[in-house]
Image (tube, rainbow, N blue to C red):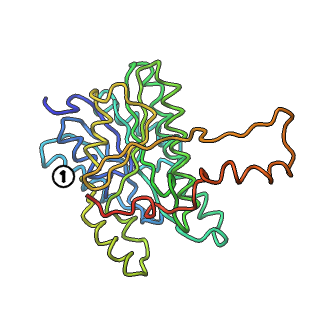
Amino acid sequence: MTGFVAGKTAIVTGGGRGIGRAIAMLLAKEGARVVVCDIGASLQGEGADAGPAQETVAAIEQAGGEAIASTLSIVEPKNAEQIVRDALSAFGRVDILVNNAGILRDVIFHKMSWSDWSDVINVHLNGAFNMSRALAGLFREQKSGAYVHMTSTSGLVGNFGQANYMAAKMGIVGLSRGIALDMARFNVRSNCIAPFAWTRMIESIPVQTDEEKRRLKAFQEMTPEKIAPLAVYLGSDAAEGVSGQIMSVRNNEVFLFNQPRPVRTIHRPDGWTPEELAAQLKGAFGGALTPLERSEDVFDWDPI
């Protein structure tokens, strides 16, 4: 067996469409056996359809690879455990988990309902935890394993109408970092990718201005297939020593993100009062305060 991840088994959630499908296809092309997990829900998380997962498996098999499908919902911990058991039954081992599944419920915050919030958190964050936890014992025993989680610049930077999605995606950053710290002793790695790609999620974002329409057209060049190589690399043995990191792919660009660290400090030996903070804080911190930017304000050049 040849390929960059030959002999490995990977589980890919949300693997029936978009970025997940592209990652599943490339993993298989590079020699991995793949468990394609996808309940086939709408972008908003409604309904179910076994088709997308089965279609991805069929495409992998047609190309000469090995894959099985799962339509179990990762929101339930018992389902995550069953997915792992099914992977072991089919392929004998698991080496890579790609936490990619997600939904959108975009709405301005003062109109956001509890279900808008909880459904997004459940799929993105709780689903990522459930799958990661279901594999943790196995990875610990075999003293190897790689987690690849999908975050978003919507969370890392910001966007309108996505407080639920932003919270979930920043939660995934914390989850990934926690896994990386706790499981480093077992040779287990965990990293995040913030992908830029033309998918159902991007296509659903409303555009109004001519500039937004122009930028959206540029997004169409950023196909899901351009995200897949970084995911495969991070899941491979070649990424040894790379853990707890946040990266991004934007067309042909690959970015490494910084992570929160102190940037300025002020000190008074006798402590602070609100009045003293009012007198000094803005002057000391003003130049270093993070502005209320959106992702497109930070990535303000056309994709390369």
Residue 172, image x, y percentages = 51, 44
What residue do we see at 54% from left, 33% from top?
178
Q: Quadrant of residue 241?
A: top left
Residue 80, image x, y percentages = 47, 40
**Camera-side residue of 42 and 157:** 157
What residue do we see at 43% from left, 41% from top?
246
Q: How many marks?
A: 1
Compared with residue 304, is residue 25 higher up or lower down, i.e. above or below? Answer: above
Q: Quadrant of residue 214?
A: bottom left
Q: Is residue 165 left or right of residue 57?
A: right
Q: Is residue 123 left or right of residue 117?
A: left
**Dot 1, how many residues are within 10 Å of its Cα: few (below 14), some (14-19), or many (20+)?**
some
What residue do we see at 39% from left, 75% from top?
212
Q: Is residue 82 left or right of residue 252?
A: right
Residue 48, image x, y percentages = 41, 61
**Camera-side residue of 135 and 274:** 274
Compared with residue 90, is residue 220 higher up or lower down, i.e. above or below? Answer: below
Three-letter amino acid code at disc 1? Ala
**Camera-side residue of 196 and 69:** 196
Q: Could you tell me which quadrant the C terminus lies in?
A: bottom left
Residue of label 1: 59
Compared with residue 194, is residue 245 higher up or lower down, i.e. above or below? Answer: above
Residue 14, image x, y percentages = 38, 52
Q: Could you tell me which quadrant the N terminus lies in?
A: top left
Mark 1: secondary structure: helix
What residue do we see at 22% from left, 47% from top?
25
